[in-house]
Image (tube, rainbow, N blue to C red):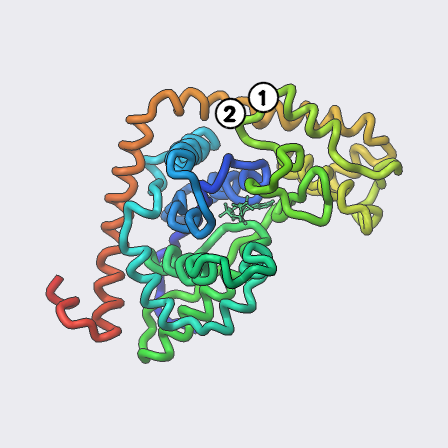
Amino acid sequence: MTQTQFTPRVFSGIQPSGGLTLGNYLGAMKRFVDMQGPEFETIYCMVDLHAITVWQDPAALSHNTRELCAGYIAAGIDPEQSILFNQSQVPEHAQLAWIFNCVARMGWMQRMTQWKDKAGKNTQNASLGLFAYPALMAADILIYHATHVPVGEDQKQHLELTRDIAIKFNNDFGVDFFPVTEPVIEGAATRVMSLRDGSKKMSKSDPSDMSRINMTDDADTIAKKIRKAKTDPDALPSEVDGLEDRPEARNLVNIYAALSDSSAAQVLAEVGGKQFGEFKPMLAELAVEKLSPISSEMARLMGEQSEIDQILARGAEKARAIAAPILKQTYEIVGMVGAASR
Ligand code: AQP
């Protein structure tokens, strides 16, 4: 563990690997907004270098990066208060990632469940970048000496690896340089599940559009997707224990709880005993009420492309002002000639 007092600083990112989903919003973005305030410096990123670990059409990548930026702002991230940028504009991420590629062990990467899920059976054909993804993620966080990282449940293992990399670097070089970052995995919807299969995470890249709510879906589409969401024939229970072995019911209750800033227990106290025929329209109404203002603001911002590009460029400049000195010190610690005079 480190003894150094680090500035309380939040870093997190989202991949522009598709359109934003309700899972990204509830598990990550909404909580990024909550963490904006006097307690922390906040740095939020569109992690485009991560996105290309699987094939991305170049035009779609640019579009999705801008749309994600619009999503951050529409959801409540203030680019004056938080640093908002896309990863590839700050080369220090990739530079530190290389150092971490040399610190992390192959065995650590091989244990990552996201690697196993995304590479599937054909690991020989997966990109080297996909395998090394967690080292780049560690660099994203540690290049800012971030102390807190809000993420969804699926990123827990990668954050543990980030801590392992920080500890190993500090031990290998006999320094107390990188913080051992705290994951912040909180709220009612840390793992929003697919609307078609309660055992699968809601994901941007799921081939079925009916499995997810996109932040750009209109009111009718949201209502239709919720109406068609897979459920079971029983009424909702009055207590959380009654959701055990009912993953689809639990998912819809958790989504309702997160959208209404309450807990599953509070929701069930209100809706326990209702059939899905009654609960689904309530959920659809709430989802439309909360998401429509965000999607219409995203659409408006997407009409202002040059403004988005300027916000990203300004954000990248501010990010580099923090990242460059940390990279310089890292190079000095590692023994790279010339680092001290840069
Ligand atoms: N279903 C989810 N429930 C809660 N949180 C979620 N997150 C993603 N899906 C859910 C959180 O969103 C943040 C950004 O995730 P990401 O875009 O970097 O990558 P991901 O986790 O791989 O998300 P997707 O949607 O599944 O993307 P693809 O399909 O491209 O792999 C993270 O904090 C994540 O936990």
Which of discs 1 and 2 lies nearer the camera? The answer is: 1
Q: Do the residues labelled 1 and 2 touch (CB within 8 Å)?
A: yes
Task: Please identify the quadrant where the N terminus is shown.
Answer: bottom left
Q: Give me the C-alpha separation between circle 1 and circle 2.
A: 8 Å
* Residue at disc 1, secondary structure: loop
Task: Please identify the quadrant where the C terminus is shown.
Answer: bottom left
* Residue at disc 2, secondary structure: helix
Residue 265 disc label: none
Q: Which residue is drawn at 34% across and 47% down?
A: 87
Query: Which amino acid, mark 1?
Result: Asp
Where is residue 102 shown, x and y percent of the image?
Answer: 36, 71
Q: Which residue is drawn at 72% across and 39% down?
A: 196
Q: Circle 1: is it few (<14), some (14-19), or many (20+) Cα within 10 Å?
A: some
Where is residue 73 shown, x and y percent of the image?
Answer: 42, 32
Nearer to us in this view, 81 or 195: 195
- In the picture shown, does residue 34 fall above or below 298? below
- In the picture shown, does residue 111 fall above or below 88? below
Q: Circle 2: is it few (<14), some (14-19), or many (20+) Cα within 10 Å?
A: many
Q: Residue at x 49, y 58 (%)?
A: 126
Where is residue 232 shown, x and y percent of the image?
Answer: 84, 39
**Precedes in sequence: disc 1 or disc 2:** 1
Mark 2 lies on residue: 295
Residue 218 disc label: 1
Query: Which amino acid, mark 2?
Result: Ser
Where is residue 38 shown, x and y percent of the image?
Answer: 39, 44
Left/right of residue 48 with respect to residue 312 in the rendered view? right
